[in-house]
Amino acid sequence: MTNIQRDKIDIPVTSFEEVILARQLVRELMERLGFSLLAQTRIVTAVSELARNMVVHAKDGRLTATKVTQGARVGVNCIFQDSGPGIEDIDQAMREGYSTTKSLGLGLGGAKKLCGEFNITSSMGKGTKIDITEWVK
């Protein structure tokens, strides 16, 4: 089920078309929140990579993106949750050049470099959760 509100997006990510939709919706949310074009581009690039990983490795997942506040700060938080096979060795998966699909291996580590805050948890056979947050500067 897709749920799109002014300050919250909750969508399934099961196809590359939904990866594109996720990018568009997160960019629109960030624009409304006052993020610079550079910040939008960085986070939308990370969103694209993380959503694509869900489709490729887990076959499906969900993206929830919400406006967050901390005192006077305003930001966006994106949670990518899947119930796929999980990541056996997160440290190895985060290393530049590591790939299980013969890609360039820039995905997880590259996404982390683009985000202000990046957290990942994974359990074999149960899935992966990635939580990113970026604050308006």
Image: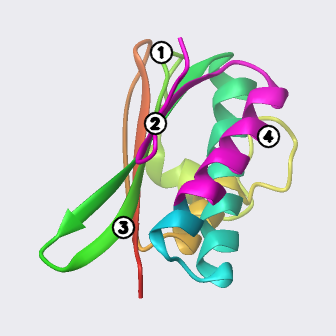
Q: Are marks 2 and 1 in contact (CB under 8 Å)?
A: no
Q: Secondary structure at mark 1?
A: loop
Q: CA distance from mark 3 to mark 4?
A: 21 Å
Q: How many residues crowd around disc 3 within 10 Å: few (fewer than 14), some, or many (20 or more)?
A: some
Q: Amino acid at mark 1?
A: Ser
Q: CA distance from mark 3 to mark 1?
A: 27 Å
Q: Which residue is mark 2?
A: 5
Q: Which mark is residue 75?
A: 3
Going from the N terminus, do you reach mark 2 or mark 3 first? 2
Q: Are marks 3 and 4 in contact (CB under 8 Å)?
A: no
Q: Which residue is mark 4?
A: 20
Q: CA distance from mark 2 to mark 3?
A: 16 Å
Q: Which mark is residue 91?
A: none
Q: Nearer the viewer, mark 2 or mark 4?
A: 2
Q: Secondary structure at mark 3?
A: strand
Q: Amino acid at mark 4?
A: Ile
Q: Is residue 68 magenta?
A: no
Q: Which mark is residue 83?
A: 1
82 above or below 30? above
Q: Is residue 82 left or right of 51 when viewed as pictured?
A: left
Going from the N terminus, do you reach mark 1 or mark 4 first? 4
Quarter where residue 72 is shown: bottom left
Q: Nearer the viewer, mark 1 or mark 4?
A: 4
